[in-house]
């Protein structure tokens, strides 16, 4: 019970988040990344090289997802519970565990390629960019590791544990620390460019169009200029601690006050808010028409853990899925389906249009981070100290995403 309570507390700051499929040196491609056009690069290089898919943290994978479960493709035994969301690049899955180990696992067979040891627990989900893996550790360091060899390139020490999942855009790494700062570092050298301090702990940032967006444990969504580290605006939303998502000029974020918010990305004005009655401590997944998010029983009440599907334009409920008393993780969407785990070890696949359960798989451990999805396979870690790869009997065809 103490472990679960500690995990839930950590999640208020955690869920962390990561980087670009390859924020490389090509100026044209970098410009397209900053302006929100990830589709071509993403298909070409990787289905999930960072937390929540891209710098905007939309949590929607442009890849096939299993409608019908075939079974376990492989299961990798780590040394301790695996809480980060996996990041996948060039046929390799990257993730860390509570004993401070960080793993590179081949996704075809589930075999270990290399392991790197840090001095603290790892809750941070990795960003894999230009042959480098970036992630944080409870030992207060952000690490840059060679993706092929597992050798350290550099590390940067902060004043607190790093739950944050970094994001990499235009050769800069952005992340937060428990020292209540948002950092911008040079991705090649680890040199600090700037830091921003709002007064309380912040979530992992989402980046779009030269602005970093982060929710704050003390309350509010912040917009920070990525060039200068100066505040552009603060929106008066509820207590945060999880990365927001950005889609079509709107910042989507939940709060500990039970509301889910849609905030104008330019002005910080609230467009709409949706009341759930529970705590929203995880990141959403956003498609063209629907935003999916989990609401869990917490300090303000709320009986059942629920996944909501809400219209992005109106803020009206489309459907909801109730998962019982155990907390539901953040969802990941992939072409017509939504995937998520629960605190009792269950893993669900739902129809994105109706919320109907497609299938369920049972593990032996708490699942609190969203899965990664690639070519008909879903990947996720659990508190039973394993990384799972589940494959389907059939996969969706491109264009079926609702």
Image (cartoon, grey):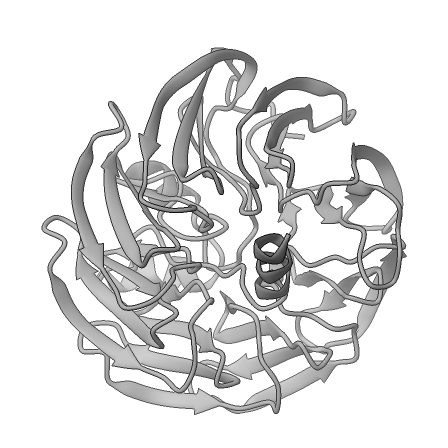
Res. 212 visible in picture:
yes
Front residue of this view, candidates 281 and 82: 82
| Horizontal and vertical percent position of residue 286 | 64, 46
Front residue of this view, candidates 349 and 119: 119
Front residue of this view, candidates 104 and 292: 104
Residue at 27% across / 64% down in the picture?
A: 27
| Horizontal and vertical percent position of residue 112 | 19, 36
Say which quarter of the image contains residue 45.
top left
| Horizontal and vertical percent position of residue 245 | 61, 58
Q: Point out the image quarter for the C terminus.
A: top right
Vertical placement of residue 216 versus 387, above or below: below
Residue at 74% across / 73% down in the picture?
A: 239
Q: Is residue 192 left or right of residue 297?
A: left
Say which quarter of the image contains residue 107.
top left
Vertical placement of residue 259 versus 184, above or below: above
Front residue of this view, candidates 165 and 246: 165
Residue at 25% across / 37% down in the picture?
A: 105
Vertical placement of residue 55 versus 322, above or below: below
Res. 171 visible in picture:
no
| Horizontal and vertical percent position of residue 97 | 37, 51
């Amino acid at each position: 019970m103490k472990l679960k309570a500690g995990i839930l507390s950590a999640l208020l700051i955690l869920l962390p988040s990561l980087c670009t499929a390859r924020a490389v040196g090509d100026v044209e491609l970098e410009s397209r990344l900053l302006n929100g056009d990830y589709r071509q690069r993403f298909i070409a290089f990787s289905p999930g090289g960072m937390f929540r898919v891209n710098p905007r943290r939309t949590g929607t994978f442009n890849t096939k997802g299993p409608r019908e479960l075939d079974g376990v493709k492989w299961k990798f035994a780590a040394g301790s519970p695996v809480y980060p969301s996996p990041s996948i690049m060039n046929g390799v899955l990257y993730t860390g565990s509570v004993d401070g180990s960080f793993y590179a696992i081949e996704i075809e067979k589930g075999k270990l390629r290399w392991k790197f040891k840090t001095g603290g627990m790892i809750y941070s989900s990795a960003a894999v960019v230009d042959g480098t893996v970036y992630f944080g550790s409870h030992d207060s360091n952000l690490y840059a590791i060679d993706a092929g060899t597992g050798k350290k390139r550099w590390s940067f020490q902060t004043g607190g544990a790093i739950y944050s999942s970094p994001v990499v855009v235009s050769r800069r790494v952005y992340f937060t620390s428990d020292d209540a700062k948002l950092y911008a570092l040079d991705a090649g050298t680890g040199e600090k460019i700037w830091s921003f301090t709002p007064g309380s702990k912040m979530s992992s940032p989402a980046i779009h169009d030269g602005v970093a967006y982060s929710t704050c444990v003390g309350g509010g969504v912040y917009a920070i200029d990525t060039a200068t580290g100066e505040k552009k605006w603060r929106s008066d939303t509820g207590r945060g601690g999880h990365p927001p998502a950005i889609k079509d000029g709107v910042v989507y974020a939940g709060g500990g006050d039970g509301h889910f918010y849609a905030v104008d990305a330019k002005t910080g004005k609230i467009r709409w808010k949706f009341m759930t009655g529970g705590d929203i401590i995880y990141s959403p997944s956003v498609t063209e028409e629907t935003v999916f998010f989990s609401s869990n029983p917490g300090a303000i009440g709320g009986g059942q853990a629920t996944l909501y599907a809400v219209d992005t334009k109106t803020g009206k409920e489309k459907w909801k899925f109730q998962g019982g008393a155990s907390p539901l993780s953040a969802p990941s969407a992939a072409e017509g389906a939504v995937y998520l785990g629960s605190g009792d070890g269950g893993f669900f696949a739902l129809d994105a249009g109706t919320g109907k359960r497609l299938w369920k798989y049972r593990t032996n451990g708490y699942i609190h981070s969203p899965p990664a999805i690639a070519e008909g396979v879903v990947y996720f870690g659990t508190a039973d100290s394993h990384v799972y790869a589940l494959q389907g009997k059939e996969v969706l065809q491109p264009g079926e995403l609702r």
